[in-house]
Amino acid sequence: MGMVGCFAAADAATIRRLKFDPNEIEKFLSPDDGESEPPHYIDVDKAWHCIHFMLCGRAGTNSNPLSMAVLGGEEIGDDVGYGPARILQPDQVRIVATALAPIDAAAFNARFVPQAMQEAEIYLSDMCVRDGNEALEYLRENYLSLVAFYLAAADRGDGAVLWLS
C-alpha cells in the first residue's frame, strides 16, 4: 500500500480541542468509525515526500515556510499510521498558503531533479528516475491539489492536521 500523505483542514476551535485532548485525534481522522473522511480532507497519495523535497530541497524540515506544507506542525497524540499526526495553527496555514501561491505548475516542474531526489533517499525517488515526465505529471497533479487545499483552508481561517497513513 505505501505511505500516503493526508491533510484535513479544521477550524480554530477544533484545533484547540485536539491540542487540549490529543485522544480526540483518532475520532477526528476517522469519523463515523472510519466510514468517513474528516471534513476538507485531501491526500497527495505517495507523492508527499517528493513534493516536500521539491519545495525544500531536502529530505527533512527546516525553517522555510514551505517546509511546513507537508512535514510541518506540532506532533499530537499517538501513532496514526507512520508516526503521530501534526497540527498547523490557522496562522501557520496562512503562511504556508502565501509561500505556496507563487509556485505554479511551471515553477514546480523546474524543481524536478530526480537524481537529487534519489541521492537524498526521497520516498518514490526511484520511480521519478525511472519514469521521468510521467512521474512529474503525477507529482504536479498532487502538488496542485495541495496548493488548492492550503489556499481554501487559509481563506476559511482554518488550521490543518497532517499525517502519514
Image (spheres, helix red, strand yellow):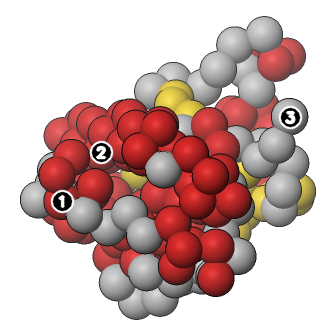
Q: Quadrant of the N terminus?
A: top right
SS category of the residue bearing label 3: loop
- The kind of residue on which mark 2 rests is Val
Q: Quadrant of the C terminus?
A: top right
Camera-side residue of 89 and 57: 57
N-terminal label among 1 and 2: 1
N-terminal label among 3 and 2: 3
SS category of the residue bearing label 2: helix
User: Would you name the residue on which mark 2 appears?
Assistant: 147
User: Would you name the residue on which mark 3 appears?
Assistant: 1
Q: Is residue 101 left or right of residue 144?
A: left
Q: CA distance from mark 3 to mark 1?
A: 30 Å
Residue 29, compared with residue 159, is above or below; it is above
- The kind of residue on which mark 3 rests is Met
Q: Position of residue 45 (x, y in %)?
A: 62, 37
- The kind of residue on which mark 1 rests is Ala
Residue name at image x 51 percent, y 66 percent: 114
Q: Residues within 10 Å of mark 2 (few under 14, many from 20)?
A: many
Q: CA distance from mark 1 to mark 2?
A: 13 Å
Camera-side residue of 28 and 41: 41
User: Would you name the residue on which mark 1 appears?
Assistant: 107
Q: Is residue 67 left or right of residue 64?
A: right
Q: Position of residue 41 (x, y in %)?
A: 52, 29
Q: Position of residue 135 (x, y in %)?
A: 51, 44
Q: Are marks 1 and 2 in contact (CB under 8 Å)?
A: no
Residue name at image x 86 percent, y 48 percent: 81
Camera-side residue of 8 and 59: 59
**Residue 9 shows which numbered tag?**
none
SS category of the residue bearing label 1: helix
